[in-house]
Image (tube, rainbow, N blue to C red):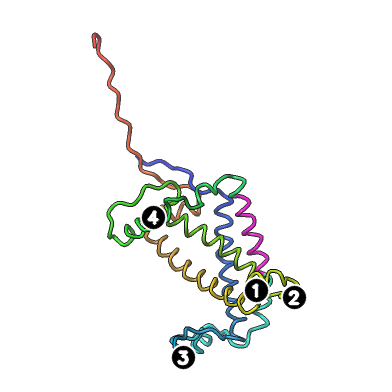
Amino acid sequence: MKVIKEKHSLLMRWTHWVNFPILTIMIWSGMLIYWSSDTYSITLFGHTFYKFFPQGFYNALNIPGRLAEGMAFHFLFMWLFAINGVVYILYTLISGSWRELVPQRKSFKEAWLVLLHDLHIRKMAPLQNKYNAAQRIAYTAIIVMGFGSLITGLAIYKPVQFSTLTWLCGGYHAARIEHFVLTIGYVLFFIIHIVQVILAGWNNFRSVISGFEVVNTKPKPAIEPQKDGE
């Protein structure tokens, strides 16, 4: 028998869907800013294996020469990103839903079992409640990353006014590297998250839109009436 079960609250869904376009615009505008000083690469023993980013990449996305536009979008949407994040964190603390989100002691061990199950190496997945162990770690990590992006972003944006934050980040250049690495992390998270959503199926995706999911339950066995004398 199929029943409809509530899974995600309205505020959780609102902050989730609002955050997606905001973060997308933040990454896009950040690329417009990074173009003016693209100094990072993967280099080992004097050999550059990959430069962030090739000129063809910039040309394909129409990035060159849009520094001022990128800064305007980035500095506007960073406040929306921060406000949305604060609202979500306050909600999880006040509602108590953080208990379903924060990793447990066994989460790091079970996350490997979840990965093996997703790779079809292990047949059975570990028991879970609302989120499995891998989701707990990933979703908590993305919150920490968001906080890190805000701190490093302020350190880059106003290194004199926020000199303490800049010092905590290891200096201006270190803060810029950390901000860049976090951005790469968001892109990787997006890719993995979308793949996992596709694998999880339509019912899971629908629950993040409507807040409800359809659950299959086993019907309770009928109780036969006792006969006289039994």
Choose the circle earlier in sequence order: 4 or 2. Answer: 4
User: How far apart are the two marked residues, 4 and 3, measured between alpha carbons?
Assistant: 38 Å
Closer to the eye: label 2 or 3: 3
Closer to the eye: label 3 or 1: 3
Crowd around label 3: few <14 · some 14–19 · many ≥20 (10 Å): few
Residue 116 screen position, x and y as percent: 32, 59
Which residue does the image show at 36% across and 43% down from the upper left?
A: 216
Residue at which label 1 appears: 74
Residue at which label 3 appears: 46
Type of the residue with mark 3: Gly
Residue 150 screen position, x and y as percent: 63, 67
SS category of the residue bearing label 4 = helix
Type of the residue with mark 1: His
Residue at which label 4 appears: 109
User: On residue 160, which mark appears?
Assistant: 2
The reply to whether discs 4 and 3 touch (Cβ–Cβ < 8 Å) is no
Type of the residue with mark 4: Lys
Most foreground residue, 47 or 134:
47
